[in-house]
Amino acid sequence: VITTDRASTQRIVKTKVFQATSESAIDDVVMYTDDSMTYFGANLEVQTGSIFTNNDIEANFYSILDIAGDASAVDQINVSWTSSLEAATLNADNYPPAPETIAMPGIDFDSADPNSYKNLADNIYTSSEFDDLLDGTSNLIIDGITYVTGNIDIKKGHNLTVNGMLVADGNINLGTSFWPFWVSNPDLFVNSNGSDPSGIITKRKIVFGFFSDDIQIDGLVYAADEIIISSIFTGYGLNGGLYTRNLSVYDFWAPLNINYDQAIISRGLGTPETSPI
């Protein structure tokens, strides 16, 4: 409260606090959002599995969504006249019956539990240390569980192969800047060995930018806050699952091909004692 001789003013600041609380993979759901799921110019093919949101599915600007399983929204499914959505069934408030809410699965990033990702990590780096690794090796390969305390920025000239799981406290950005324009766009490959966790996960946001090249992931893609997928020319491939609070896809018709793999998702989620707020 600020007070002067003549008047007083008060500023109220509001924020949203969220925490994932579920402890397991969701049967048959390859793409899950706790909030909205928005597609703009997207070319999405879910070859196995279903998509689910606790809010709305929005398909706009000539989006083509082809879902092998179900498309389910607790609130609304809205498809613009320029777009299409094909699925085994549509389930929403405007396509009854609407599904029940499903809690977002949580991940134990850094609690004191010995099974948290920070305690299981084979390597732990600060954000600047991981930047140095990327800058120092044109084709960086990392194995096992790698934990980064801070943001990860995979820029032009970086090519990263993850044989296992890449974990971050902060945001993970891939190809979000065109500069330097004469340098090749970054690649990202994530491989699973069939028994250990694999994927890229973060407490905050994952942004796949317009200036990324080849992205192929066998693993879990998880962001406690938001995932943004952008592409103009290059398609993405995901075998595993994508779980986040909020998803936005600005794909401009580059193919986004996704396959459901419950074992990969379950290994990635683990059994969390706690998940971040």
Image (cartoon, helix red, strand yellow):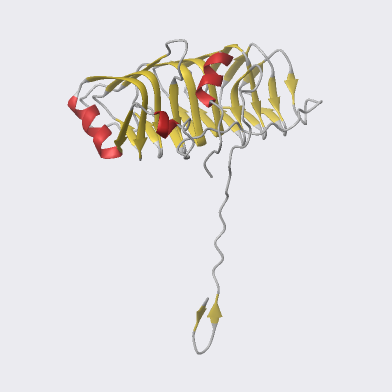
Say which residue appears at 49% left-offset and 22% top-offset: 220
Q: Relative to 126, say whether 185 is above or below.
A: above
Using the rendered view, name the quadrant where residue 57 is placed.
Answer: top right
Q: Quick check: 214 left or right of 196? A: left
Front residue of this view, candidates 55 and 255: 55
In which quarter of the view is residue 29 placed?
top right
Above or below, 159 against 74 in this view is above
Res 157 quadrant in image? top left
Quadrant that contains the C terminus? top right
112 and 166: which is toward the camera? 112
- Res 76 visible: yes
Relative to 227, 151 lies left or right = left
Instruction: Kindly identify the residue that appears in the image at 58 percent across and 50 percent down.
Output: 16
- The residue nearer to you, when weighing 36 against 43, is 36
Q: x and y percent of residue 257 in the render? A: 51, 13
Residue located farthest toward the right when viewing the structure as drawn: 97
Residue at the bottom extreme, as displayed: 5
